[in-house]
Image (cartoon, rainbow, N blue to C red):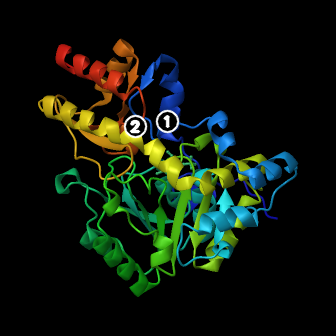
Amino acid sequence: MMVTEVDQNAQAGFAPMFPPFELEQYLLRHEPRMRVSLCASGLETMSLSALLPLMNAELEALWAQTSLDYTHPKGSMVLREAIAQQYDTLTAQRVGVFAGAAEAILCTLQGLLTPGDHAVVITPCYQSLLSIPASLCQVSTVSLREATGWQLELDRIQAALTPNTRVIIINFPNNPTGALPSLSVLSELVEMARKRGIYLFSDEVYRLMEIDVADRLPPVATLYERGISVSSLSKAYGLPGLRIGWVASQAPEVLEKAIDIKHYTSICVTSPGEVLALSALRDGAAIVERNLQQMRANLPMMDQFFERMGEHCRWVRPRGGCLGFSRYLRDKTADSLCQNLLKATGVMVLPGSLYGPYSAHFRIGFGKKDCKEALSQLESFLVTHRSG
Ligand SMILES: Cc1ncc(COP(=O)(O)O)c(C=O)c1O
């Protein structure tokens, strides 16, 4: 093993490995002041006392006998089979379990990309979808633009491709914009990737949270032989603390390489986590439907809020997920709005600058019970404070 003190990333002209995770750092810094979140990326979370009674006799027996040993690095076969049911054309062999989508993203991209490669990343996005590839190879970003309604612009993606492009990275429904392309646009993207043998990496953690169910897209792993779908139980299932996520792909090398990396990270997920995940997936449709009720009930309130607040801020109504990316209209940036709102009311919305060059925007969430109270605080703040 060769060990050098040279910063190989800097030498190769890549971004540093693991730069500060801006959004997480912001939350840690400001959480002590926060009384109510109006920016959460998830729905109301489930408790153990809600999940345990859902177990049938077979699962109860499995739960009681669960040994606290290491589990299989790819995840137990029963859990992989339960996950594979979400992917029409895939068997459990093509699914691997990870500690949340976060670990699945890290391990898969680390396994896929080498210094000679090029990646195209659609932004704005969850930071690791950009920071991880940027630390491994050359990256081009293609931004969704508010002026187009945050649409996926295929001609701009086509123009960003190079002979070395190994992967295109997308996340729909998108964090933070709530954007979601049509199936025909996604299919065109698949064809663009297929023509050049480029992997299509798709973060689908907000899948199942479409505002209109008719807009739900098939997982990319089922559409394309080099498609990679990443998802987890954190969002639609309301179980982020379970830390269960996965990768699904028809391409066997994707999972093999990701697991090679996972030996260096978590090694495996926990055995209680696996049984609880199995229980959640067996009752999946009912759990998701119940979790989504709050988000659906909150959305008309959000619509009315933006109608009334038109001189202060606007949004492109999200098509999926429980997040929107609102444009603040009273200042060049929304940074001081976010800070002053938090100071005055304890309500947190997130500055768009955490996502890069989007400082005029702020992220707003509508998946939680206390959305109504938080929204009315934001409204009074906007109306009473002439300068945000
Ligand atoms: C787009 C996106 N991907 C991945 C993650 C990480 O999810 P998990 O809790 O499954 O690790 C998040 C969390 O907010 C997210 O918004």
Q: Determine which of the numbered discs, if any, sits on residue 140 in the image.
A: none
Indicate whether 271 appears above or below 302: below
Query: Which numbered circle lies on residue 44?
Result: 1
The residue type indicated by label 2 comes to Gln
- Quarter-wise, where is residue 326 in the image? top left
Observer able to see residue 114: no
Amino acid carrying mark 1 in the image = Glu
Quadrant including the C terminus: top left
Give the x, y percent position of residue 211.
Answer: 32, 51
Measured as percent of width and height from the top left, residue 238 is found at 54, 43
Compared to residue 319, the image places residue 200 above or below, namely below
Residue on which the image places disc 2? 294
x and y, in percent, of residue 14 in the image: 52, 59
Residue 268 in the figure: left or right of residue 309: right
Q: Is residue 136 above or below residue 162?
A: above
In the displayed structure, would residue 234 be above or below residue 48? below
Q: Residue at 49% x, 49% y: name it.
A: 288
Image quarter of the N terminus: bottom right
Q: Nearer the viewer, residue 325 or 374?
A: 374
- Tell me if mark 2 has few (under 14), some (14-19) or many (20+) residues whose alpha carbon lies within 10 angstroms of its own: some
